[in-house]
Amino acid sequence: MFEPIEKRESLSGHVETELTKAIRLGQYLPLQKIPTENELCSIFNVSRTVVREAIKGLSAKGIVDVRKGSGVYVSEMSIQNASETLNLFFGLSSDEDVMLQTIDARAMIEPLIASKSAVIRKPKHIALLQDNMEKMRLCPLDDKKQEAELDNQFHRILLDCIENPVLHLLVDPIFNLMPKFKYNVFGKTITDNLDKEKEKMLYYHQMITNAIVDKHPLRAENFMKEHLKVTRENYIKALNK
């Protein structure tokens, strides 16, 4: 199931990652006991200290429960750790199909978020959106990492307009993935039309912001649909480069 670790750096991190993957893939189910400390030492060919550090990391993330005198068990799913589990899934997923499915999922959810935000937004949200737009305009063209963070922040502000913790639970993991996704895919492949690509993004963000300021839900929804359609088209282009 697991392979012994050959590299001698960040051993506890590697063990933690491997156990996380096993749990995510269902090799260990909620409330099921994982291998003992001695067994993990043998499996990964590492010391007890390394295994203990890895377990400590998993426990801090709410992935496992350490029961004194009994062992280590996969945590039972709860509202508190459900978001972390989703974050792990998206964070460890890098194949092209998952990325495309993520964009498609956003296209089904975010237009409705934009529409609802246009109805219930507060002055503080308008101020945040306008500040975000200004920072985005001033962001250097070659700083794709900062641009990705600001882009993600824009979409999070819309989500924050809707004070619904369950919606946050469902959407946050997707948003957590987007900066890394945009930087790794778009930032490193679409380098010949930086001005044009940024201009497109600024246009849609501004149109969505204007619709929210004007309390026009249908317009906000439609511009978000167009924005994510362009995002999908750009992703396909990036893959073909």
Image (spheres, grey):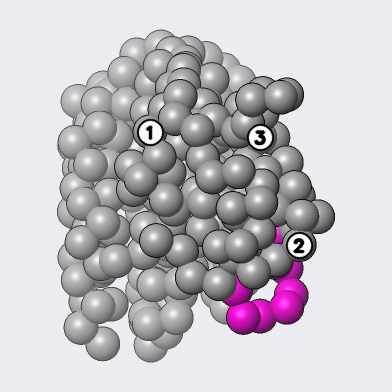
Disc 2 target residue:
47
Residue 5: x and y in percent read 60, 73
Q: What range of the chain is rendered magenta?
A: 5-12
Is residue 8 placed above or below 224 in the rendered structure?
below
Residue drawn at point x = 35 percent, y = 45 percent: 27
Marks 1 and 3, the one that precedes in the sequence: 1
Residue 111: x and y in percent read 24, 33
Disc 3 target residue:
59
Q: Nearer the viewer, residue 223 or 191?
A: 191
State the SS at label 2.
loop
The mark closer to the camera, 1 or 2, is 2
Query: Please, what is the three-letter code of the amino acid marked with disc 1?
Result: Leu
Disc 1 target residue:
29
User: Was residue 71 drawn as part of the magenta stretch in this picture?
Assistant: no
The majority secondary structure of the magenta stretch comes to loop
Query: Please, what is the three-letter code of the amino acid marked with disc 3?
Result: Ser
User: Was residue 9 drawn as part of the magenta stretch in this picture?
Assistant: yes
State the SS at label 1.
loop
